[in-house]
Amino acid sequence: MKTALILVGKTNDTHLQAIINDYAERITHYMPFEIIVIPELKNTKSLSEEQQKVREGELIMKQLTAQDTVILLDERGKQYRSLEFAKWIEKQQLTARRLVFVIGGPYGFSPAIYDRANGKISLSAMTFSHQLVRTIFTEQLYRACTIIKGEPYHHE
């Protein structure tokens, strides 16, 4: 199973980007993994929040195929403990061709993206910056990979 993470906007903090790159590289030892960065929209001052979400949604949709299993990182999504997330990933490996996680822009997702999604995951009931969510998610995906392989990264 191939896995992708779609991000709206680049990661500005070089320290966080280094951590994300490190975990992304580690993940590729377990599964094909890519990070796809959708460029931030230009001249957004003239656009409403809804218009921004629609435009970002159009750009996200261009990165998806009909066969993709699309999971949004969304505050209203299902929360997993790390072991549960690993089991969920393992189950996806049996059926998904490409598992695509999406972290939206500052205002969330357009209705079209919600309609296209196969599910939603929340990392926490707390709110994190988009920059930090990227870091936390790549670490959790790596952790899930090590749990699936029975490696000692996760202690429980």
Image: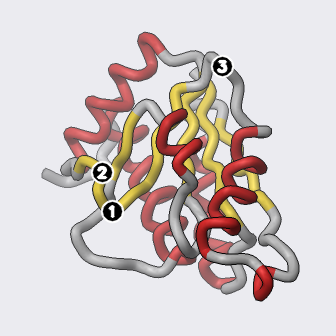
Rendered-image quadrant of the N terminus: top right
Q: How many marks?
A: 3
Q: What residue type is disc 2 on?
A: Gly
Q: Residue furthest right?
A: 42
Q: Does the CB distance between marks 2 and 1 fall below 8 Å?
A: yes
Give the mark nearest the N terminus, 1 or 3.
Answer: 3
Q: In this view, does 83 lie above or below 109?
A: above
Q: Residue furthest top?
A: 95
The 10 Å Cα crowd at callout 1, few under 14, some 14 to 19, many 20 or more, is some
Q: In this view, does 143 lie to the left or right of 65?
A: left
* Residue 112 tag number: none
* Residue 149 in view (yes/no): no
Q: Is residue 93 above or below residue 127?
A: above
Q: How far apart are marks 2 and 1 (CA)?
A: 6 Å
Q: Is residue 94 left or right of residue 127?
A: right
Q: What residue type is disc 3 on?
A: Ala
x, y percent for residue 94: 42, 12
Q: Is residue 21 left or right of residue 152?
A: right
Tell me the residue at 51%/64% (across/down).
108
Q: Does the CB distance between marks 1 and 3 fall below 8 Å?
A: no
Q: Which colour scheme is used?
A: secondary structure
The residue under label 3 is 66
**Secondary structure found at label 2:** strand
x, y percent for residue 139: 45, 59
The 10 Å Cα crowd at callout 2, few under 14, some 14 to 19, many 20 or more, is some
The residue under label 1 is 75
x, y percent for residue 64: 70, 33
Tell me the residue at 57%/75% (across/down).
106
The one of 1 and 27 positioned closer to us in this rendering: 1
* Residue 77 tag number: 2
Tell me the residue at 64%/84% (across/down).
15
**Secondary structure found at label 3:** loop
